[in-house]
Amino acid sequence: MPATSYSCTQLRIHQFAALQSGPSLIVLGAVHGSETCGTRGIERIASELDSGSLEIIRGRVSLVPVTNPLAYQRAQRNGDRNLNRNLRPNEAPQDFEDRVANVLCPLLAQHEVLLDLHSFQSPGEPFAMIGPANNTGTLEPFALAEKEQALALRLGTRRIVEGWLSTYAVGVQQRLARTMPTERAELLSTDPSYGIGTTEYMRSQGGYAITLECGQHTDPAAPDVAYQAILNTLAHLGLVSGPAPQPCTDLEFLRLTQVHDRLHAEDSFTKAWASYDPVKANECIAIRHDGTRVIAPEDGYIVFPNPNTTPGNEWFYLAHRSERNICS
């Protein structure tokens, strides 16, 4: 069967609405064009819904197999820029991703729950990323943490990670402090709101959202992880018939604590790190081009190590065990 073609002039959205009221779910694939496991999982679910072998019995479901068709067409992470940063409606769109955002943001706001399917560069097992605990702060106020946690526990992965936006905001301040004004156009934005992507935008609109990292980009099992996560989400929300999935009992719950940018093309890791490799306090993780050693401040884990990132962008994150109480 030939691969489905996705035009850069539109977003293809599969929508299903039951006659009985219920929750509204949106599932995204290929927010980053080179991360196609979600696309394959969504296409499989859409085919089953079209054939009638799977049926929405209550609520509404929207499936977007390719959220960034330009990046997908080019088989690369971004089109003109990273769609999963600085996501917001724009009255004067400047690039392709701005135009996508003008369609995507209102679509997200029409739903209560988001499952955003991704993959990652280095080897490692799948994991889910959730938002903050309930809070009334200014960075990311939130009131639906219990619902978000309950879904995360049922996606089929044992590892859950929190702390993305708060860690990214600190990283932005570090980037701002060392970056000369003439260099800023070549770097990620130094505005903390630049860290707002699909899940953060969804929470800002009164919903809840999970990013599921389904495995390494080239892992042949990643599309199956995506497919099973969608099925589990549909069952957990009661949108399809059948037993609800049970929560994970072998949970590893981590919190991101630091982000380190690559500063120079000759900055290098001390070894081929994989996501969630353990690191010991005072262990050397990487060496800057000038010989400066990047040292782990405490026992923990390395997350999203990317040896191919360009200078001025995120190189790796550090994490440790979360102290937050997560329950089903």
Image (cartoon, rainbow, N blue to C red):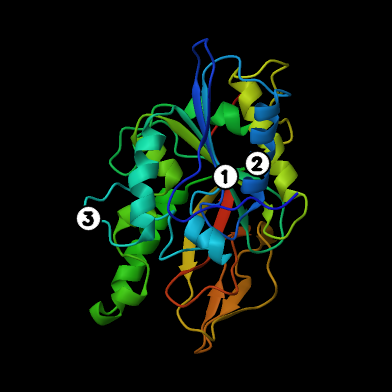
Q: Are marks 2 and 1 in contact (CB under 8 Å)?
A: yes
x%, y% of residue 34?
Answer: 59, 61
Residue visible at 68% across and 34% down in the picture: 47
On screen, 138 above or below 62?
below
Q: Are marks 2 and 3 in contact (CB under 8 Å)?
A: no
Residue position for label 1:
65
- Asked if one can make out residue 317 in the rendered structure from this viewpoint, the answer is no
Q: Dot 3: few (<14), some (14–19), or many (≥20) neighbours within 10 Å? A: few
Residue visible at 61% across and 64% down in the picture: 281
Q: Earlier in the sequence, mark 2 or mark 3?
A: 2
Residue in front for this viewpoint, 154 or 92? 92
Q: Quadrant of residue 302?
A: bottom right
Residue position for label 3:
92
Three-letter amino acid code at the position of disc 3: Ala
On screen, 182 above or below 200?
below
Q: Earlier in the sequence, mark 3 or mark 1?
A: 1
Three-letter amino acid code at the position of disc 1: Pro
Q: Residue 197 carries which label?
A: none
Residue position for label 2:
43
Q: Quadrant of residue 83?
A: bottom left
Residue in front for this viewpoint, 160 or 31? 31
Q: Is mark 2 on a helix, strand or loop?
A: helix
Residue visible at 28% across and 62% down in the picture: 94
Separation of disc 2 and disc 3 at Cα?
32 Å
- Asked if one can make out residue 1 in the rendered structure from this viewpoint, the answer is yes
Residue in front for this viewpoint, 245 or 328? 245
On screen, 88 above or below 183?
above
Separation of disc 3 and disc 1 at Cα?
26 Å
x%, y% of residue 91?
Answer: 22, 50
